[in-house]
Amino acid sequence: MACATQPAFSVVADARTPRQEEILGAARDLLAREGVEALTVARLASALNIKAPSLYKHFASKRELEVLLIAEGLEHHAAAMEVAGPNLADLAAAYRAFALENPARYRLMTARPLPRAELPEGLEARAAAPLVRAVGGDPDLARAVWAYAHGMVDLELAGRFPADADLDAAWNAAMAAFASAAG
């Protein structure tokens, strides 16, 4: 999984110790291999061959680890969206590819309220900026496109579409309609 082994969010990583990086790497791997539900303090400690309380010497809480993983995910997502191209079809393809290549990270990033106050300043806006630009700066239309994309990806990850469903055609039709709305 692409995101599981990529380096950490650069602004945050500079302040981490080598042991924190090791723990975060194990958390990335556990998340990628076994999903959000497996990301527990006990499972992480076991993967590192340490006792669970030892993790708290390096991170204040499981939540802190999750926020770092979410920040990394948003950084990788933002980078993918920035290189995707300026049109909605390209952005939608990049969004879908990111989610399908990193399903557990995507779920961690999107299944619960976003910890905005704990994320690096400007990161959420950076991740959203390519989409907002693609719809002519209309934040409401950008939210509608994002809601569609998230719903489609979520349903696809859950295996909710029939085997014969042409998801590419559905994505193309929706992006054409949104592009038309953007003018």
Image (spheres, rainbow, N blue to C red):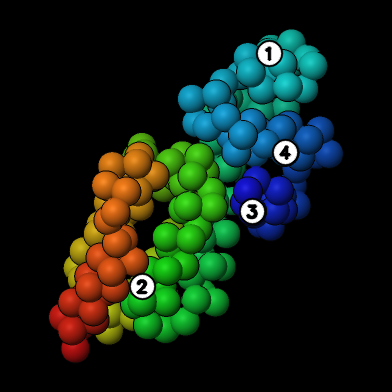
Give the residue number, with chain letter if any, for mark 2: 131
Earlier-in-chain disc, 1 versus 4: 4
Residue 156 seen in render = yes
Q: Is residue 148 above or below residue 41?
A: below
Q: Which residue appears at 60% of the width and 38% of the height? A: 32
Q: Position of residue 94 (x, y in %)?
A: 47, 67
Badges 2 and 3: C-beta atoms under 8 Å apart? Answer: no
Between 152 and 44, the residue placed more toward the observer is: 152
Q: Residues within 10 Å of mark 3 (few under 14, many from 20)?
A: few
Q: Is residue 14 above or below residue 86?
A: above
Q: Which residue appears at 48% of the width and 52% of the height? A: 100
How many marks the image carries: the answer is 4
Earlier-in-chain disc, 2 versus 1: 1
Q: Which residue appears at 38% of the width and 69% of the height? A: 92
Which numbered tag is attached to residue 2?
A: 3
Disc 1/disc 4 C-alpha distance (Å): 16 Å
Give the residue number, with chain letter if any, for mark 4: 25
Q: Is residue 158 above or below residue 10?
A: above
What kind of residue is marked 2?
Answer: Leu
Earlier-in-chain disc, 2 versus 4: 4
What kind of residue is marked 4?
Answer: Gly
Q: Which residue appears at 68% of the width and 13% of the height? A: 52
Q: Secondary structure under badge 2?
A: helix
Give the image quarter of residue 42. Answer: top right
- Closer to us: mark 1 or mark 4? 4
Q: Secondary structure under badge 4?
A: helix
